[in-house]
Image (spheres, rainbow, N blue to C red):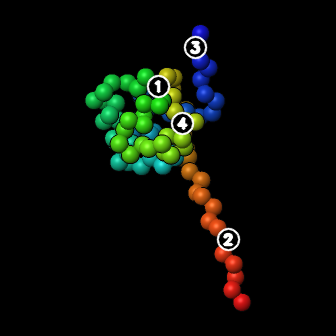
């Protein structure tokens, strides 16, 4: 039995263009190009987790990317996903 596809907009990392990969959070032109080059050199990704083998995709990046990654089906993500920034600690006003 095949697993159900993840809910929400997805990027198929086996077929996505450099431009489509850049819609992912924290993926710019250089990283998107490295993903495509890795895929070209090594063949299709068998699982989304394999993207962590690409230089520049560490554990924290993968955690942010994971909800949007798939290795099957169409790319349905059409707008850039903004990665939430960590909240800055409040600064006390000095009197």
Quarter of the figure with the C terminus: bottom right
Q: Mark 2 points at which residue?
A: 90
Q: Which of pointers 4 and 1 lies earlier in the amino acid sequence?
A: 1
Residue count near mark 4 (Cα–Cα under 10 Å), binned few <14, some 14–19, many ≥20: some
- Per the image, label 1 sits on a secondary structure element best described as loop
Real-space Cα separation, disc 3 to disc 2, in angstroms: 47 Å
Q: Which of pointers 3 and 2 lies earlier in the amino acid sequence?
A: 3
Residue count near mark 3 (Cα–Cα under 10 Å), binned few <14, some 14–19, many ≥20: few
Real-space Cα separation, disc 2 to disc 4, in angstroms: 30 Å
Residue 45: where, in percent of width, then height?
Answer: 41, 26
Q: Mark 1 points at which residue?
A: 47
Residue drawn at x 27%, y 29% as measured from the top left: 41
The reply to whether residue 32 is visible in this rendering is yes
Residue count near mark 1 (Cα–Cα under 10 Å), binned few <14, some 14–19, many ≥20: few
Q: Name the residue under label 3.
A: 2
Q: Which disc is residue 66 wearing?
A: 4
- Per the image, label 4 sits on a secondary structure element best described as helix
Residue 8 occupies which quadrant of the picture?
A: top right
Residue 5 occupies which quadrant of the picture?
A: top right
Image marks 2 and 4: residues in contact by CB distance under 8 Å: no
- Per the image, label 2 sits on a secondary structure element best described as loop
Q: How many labels does the image show?
A: 4
Image marks 4 and 1: residues in contact by CB distance under 8 Å: no
């Amino acid at each position: 039995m095949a697993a159900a596809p993840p809910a929400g907009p997805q990027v198929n990392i086996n077929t996505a263009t450099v431009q489509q990969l850049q819609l992912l959070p924290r993926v710019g032109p250089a990283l998107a190009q490295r993903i495509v080059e890795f895929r070209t050199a090594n063949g299709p990704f068998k699982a989304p987790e394999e993207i962590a083998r690409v230089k520049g995709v560490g554990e924290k990046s993968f955690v942010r990317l994971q909800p949007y990654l798939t290795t099957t089906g169409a790319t349905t993500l059409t707008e850039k996903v903004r990665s939430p920034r960590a909240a800055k600690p409040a600064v006390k006003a000095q009197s």
